[in-house]
Image (cartoon, rainbow, N blue to C red):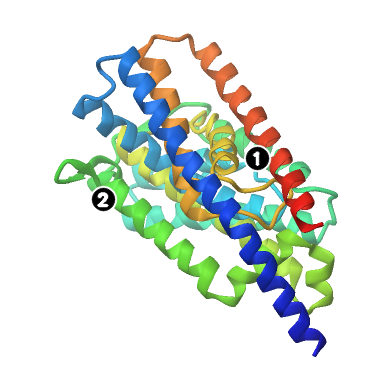
Amino acid sequence: MAHEREAAAAGQEAKKQKPRKNMYSVGVILSLILLSLVMAVLSPRFLTVDNLTNVASQAAVSAIISCGMFLAILTGGIDLSVGSVLALSTMLMGVVCVNHGVDPYLSMLLCLAVGGGLGLLNGLMLTKMSLPHPFISTMGMKMMARGAALVITAAAPISIFPEPVQFIGNNYLGPLPLSLFLVAILYACMYLFLTRTATGRYIYAVGGNKEASRLSGIKVHRVLNLVYTLSGFTAALAGIVLVGRVNAAYPLAGQDYDSDAIAAVIIGGASFFGGVGSIGNTIIGVLIIAVLRNGLNLLNVDSNYQTFAIGAVIILAVYIDVLRQKVMQVGRR
């Protein structure tokens, strides 16, 4: 009977929160439309086919990284290492594929394995070493991976990859970049994983209350290890797409991707407090950041001011999250 009452209470709470979530989703979409209209007015080049295709290509890389970042933030954590993991995994792919002639498909598998392995290390530092917060473990990994990426080729880029590596990042299906279809498949799989599997529900539960999840029998450490492994894996996957697009791997690649992914996830409605968020809204957040960066480039805004703008957006998004949490707490009373 107690379990039935708890289930009924949870159902009633979900019904109360659903209208608020829907309203937030509409607000995010309207924000994207408004931002696009503003950029179209300020720059005639914004709505050209070439520019929109460029926005889509750039957004694809951020969208893939943001998919993994969403999982980390959903558990109440964060992954600051995604840009460095991208750089190191793609540099190693370049070393074995271009410098040593290893089969490109095996090289891409190595890239994904390195990304997933570095993500797993992030999780193990958090769960086995009992570091107080993923900010510490992922910040350390960020610095180590970036340093390793610079060391292995003495900070030199690697270019001229074989066609299989370039395939996803450099090809189109009709007018659309092939990478967009990869994003669509990835987000569809992530939606099904989070909403249709027990592990997906465990991720939400861990983000909502780790101690309660542990007491209810959920293997919290196993969930966290999986989440950070997937975050590293998606960073490496995004790296393959990026390398395919520019036909080169750079040790300094991906420096802004961690901040862009965090901004996109929070703008999309995920909460830094954990347990709240929608993978569907995350892609809207990705597009908002991509449109903002592209528009600022078209307006010839200095890159330093662009960095300032993205930082301001992150602060604003987190502040909105804080206000949303306060409103939800009032609604529960």
Q: Report the residue marked by disc 1.
A: 80
Q: Distance of mark 1 from mark 2, alpha carbons?
A: 29 Å
Q: Residue at x 70, y 66 (%)?
A: 205
Q: Position of residue 86 (x, y in %)?
A: 51, 42
Going by the image, does 119 lie left or right of 90?
A: right
Q: Earlier in the sequence, mark 1 or mark 2?
A: 1
- Give the percent coordinates (x, y) of residue 116: 55, 57
Residue ID for mark 2: 164
Residues packed near mark 1 inside 10 Å, few (<14), some (14 to 19) or many (20 plus): many
Residue extending farthest to the bottom is: 1
Question: At label 1, which amino acid type do we have?
Answer: Leu
- Residue under the image location 39 percent in, 16 percent down: 297
- Mark whose residue sits in front, 1 or 2: 1
Residue 247: mark in rendering: none
Q: Nearer the viewer, residue 325 or 218?
A: 325
Q: Measuring 67% from the left and 28% from the top, which residue is drawn there?
A: 315
Disc 2 residue crowd, few under 14, some 14–19, many 20+, Cα 10 Å: few
Residue 294 figure quarter: top left
Whether residue 226 sits left or right of residue 10 in the image: it is: left
Q: Looking at the picture, which amino acid does disc 2 mark?
A: Pro
